[in-house]
Image (cartoon, grey):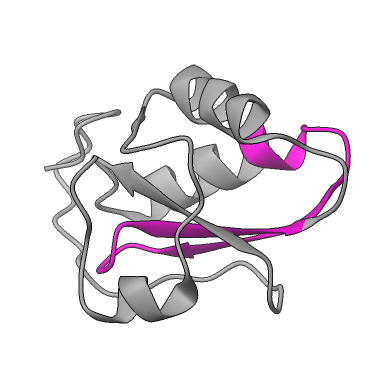
Amino acid sequence: MCTACACGTADTASAQVATSGGTVYQVSGMTCGHCVSSISAEIGKVDGVTGVQVDLAGGAVTVSGAGFSGEEIRTAVDQAGYAPADTSPVSPSQTEAGPLGG
């Protein structure tokens, strides 16, 4: 069940919002399309962010752009109702192996 909205959705497939490349952050609690929309909208409001890609299965959010900090991304994730696993970005190869602990 979606932990943020309790919509009952148990979708574990990857969902993406268009972008390529960027900085990857681990986020826990994302389970459905509503999660993707909420995370994408909040992170998209951060100055300098030009794209957001959400991987539900891997618990990863890839943020592209320039001039934003890990703390700004953490704040946006908190405002969306989710828990950032860490403010430090991870390398894309780390997300391929699965979610990381924080």
Classify residue 85 as left or right of residue 34.
left
- At 52% from the left and 41% from the top, the residue drawn is 39
Q: Is residue 46 above or below residue 49?
A: above
Q: Quadrant of the C terminus?
A: top left
Measured as percent of width and height from the top left, residue 26 is found at: 37, 50
Range shown magenta: 42-64
In depth, the one of 84 and 82 nearer the eye is 84
Q: Residue at x 29, y 29 (%)?
A: 5
The answer to if 3 sits in the magenta stretch is no
Counting every numbered tag in the picture gives 0
Residue 49 magenta-highlighted = yes
Q: Give residue 13's quadrant in the image.
A: bottom left
In this view, 30 is above or below 4: below
| 64 or 69: nearer the viewer | 69
Residue 66 relative to residue 97: left or right: right
Q: Give how far across and how far down residue 87 sits, in percent.
A: 47, 35
**Residue nearest the viewer, comparing 58 with 93:** 93
Quadrant in the rendering for residue 8 = top left
Figure check: 3 above or below 100: above
x, y percentage for residue 46?
Answer: 77, 33
- Percent across and percent down for residue 67 are 87, 41
**Residue pictured at 25% horizontal, 68% vertical:** 57
In the image: residue 32, left or right of residue 49: left
Identify the residue at image location x=20%, y=40%: 2
State which quarter of the image contains the N terminus. top left
